[in-house]
Amino acid sequence: MNTALNKKYFSHVIPSILAFALSGVYTIVDGFFIGQSLGDTGLTAITLGYPISALVGAIGTGLGLSGAIRFAILSAQGETQRRQECFSGTTLLMLIAAALLTATLFAFAEPILYLLGARGDMLALCVSYARVIALGAVFQLLATGFVPFIRNMGGATVAMIAMILGFVTNIALDYAFVWALSWGMAGAAWATIIGQAVTMIVAVLFFLVKKSRFCLPGSRELCRLWKNVLIVAISPFGLTFSSTITMLFINRFLLLYGNEQAVAVYGCIGYITSILYLLLQGVGDGSQPLISQYYGKGDHRCVRATRKLAYLTAMVVTAACMAGVYLARAKVGTLFGASQEANAGVIQYLPLFLATLLCLAFVRITTSYFYATEKNKLSYLLVYAEPVCTLLMLLILPPVLKLTGVWLAVPIAQVLTFVIAWVAKRRVDAKI
């Protein structure tokens, strides 16, 4: 049993980790090209504007993964018709969400970015980026939302290929639009949404090959499905977006206690650590189909065995990344075209963010386990504990320690969140 389970686990998780590794690089590609083209100003602008793109992707991931979890449980229970209705209903919900996001973000991009701290020429750069992202929201939302369904339909390798093709497209177009044509921030945004469109098209082709029918349930059942999807979606949305929420808080306090160069420093650190966040999401999302299937069958022994493998995988990946990034920390700022002063800041403060990453790994896998088994309240708790703890630390530390207090807020918040996750897991295990 263990050998068979291990083989099944790694057949799901390895493609997922590879896909999210590329997705992690995907998130820093815009920063690389913009930073190399515009220097510290570009890095600050893309750091302030990135949350708009991250919001769209997080909503897609939340809705898609929530629907895919329900799809996997219904599949394990032999409910063929209901699982197709789940897929179709979730797709319709994602299309509605995309339309609302496009209208809202395009109309209110300027006031939203002003609230995030963008001013003057920086605001103009950010608005040009955000409005293009808003126009292509449907591609990004469906791309991120369809990938979890592909994995839960047994297409982990296809999901990886879809993300690779989108990633390669984004790099090629970033080079063409940002460097060759000098389109600046808008060019980076166009490259992003076209890359996501490629991923979405591959997903649609997979569904056509699988002959996945689009069949909606009755209106009452559809509303019930949407309610259930939205309830569960809060967790994967938060897991994907929580680091961005933290970024928003840190950006504001860095501007308050520091300057735009401090934001550029954090932008470099944030891009690098976001890769690890996505690798951990790859472990969690890769193990989710198996955990949900075993949970649907009532096989708690296999659920716990799969979760244990996920913890071990996450710890190994995190330790390797911590070592590699620490050794290469002097090159991080240079990679993004940061000034010599900003690069010195990266070298000084990056180790603080690396020190608590093993705590983060435990929290991420525990959260994935909770929402994969529909323990929604506990998953909500862990998802939003880190940004809440970060905000509390930002309110307490900087008045005393000034800029140093801002840099310490995230590591301390991650330790506090680890303690909460450990206690929650112990209580759940005691009831199994």
Image (cartoon, helix red, strand yellow):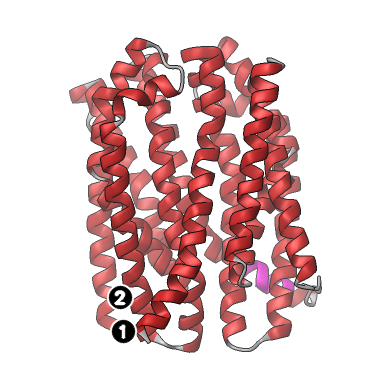
Task: Tell me the crowding category of disc 1: few under 14, some 14 to 19, or many 20 or more residues within 10 angstroms, Cα based.
Answer: few
Q: Quadrant of residue 73?
A: bottom right
Extreme residue in the left direction: 400
Task: Tell me the crowding category of disc 2: few under 14, some 14 to 19, or many 20 or more residues within 10 angstroms, Cα based.
Answer: few
Residue 392 vs residue 311, the one in the foreground? 311
Percent position (x, y) of residue 335? 43, 23
Quadrant position of the N terminus in the picture: bottom left
Asked if 252 appears above or below 102 in the picture, the reply is above
**Dominant SS in magenta:** helix
Query: Residue at image x 31%, y 30%?
Result: 328
Asked if 207 appears above or below 29 in the picture, the reply is below
Quadrant position of the C terminus in the picture: bottom left
Percent position (x, y) of residue 297? 49, 88
For the question of whether residue 62 can be seen, the reply is yes
**Which label belongs to residue 428?**
2
Q: CA distance from mark 2 to mark 1?
A: 7 Å
Residue 157 vs residue 230, the one in the foreground? 157
**Which label belongs to residue 104?**
none
Contact, mark 2 vs mark 1 (Cβ under 8 Å)? yes
Amino acid carrying label 2: it is Val
Query: Residue at image x 39%, y 45%?
Result: 276
Stretch in magenta: 222-228
Asked if 18 appears above or below 274 in the picture, the reply is below
Q: Would you say residue 101 sits in the magenta stretch?
A: no
Task: Write down the residue under mark 1.
Answer: 432
Query: Residue at image x 46%, y 56%?
Result: 17
Amino acid carrying label 1: it is Ile
SS for callout 1: loop
Residue 271 is left or right of residue 318, and the answer is right
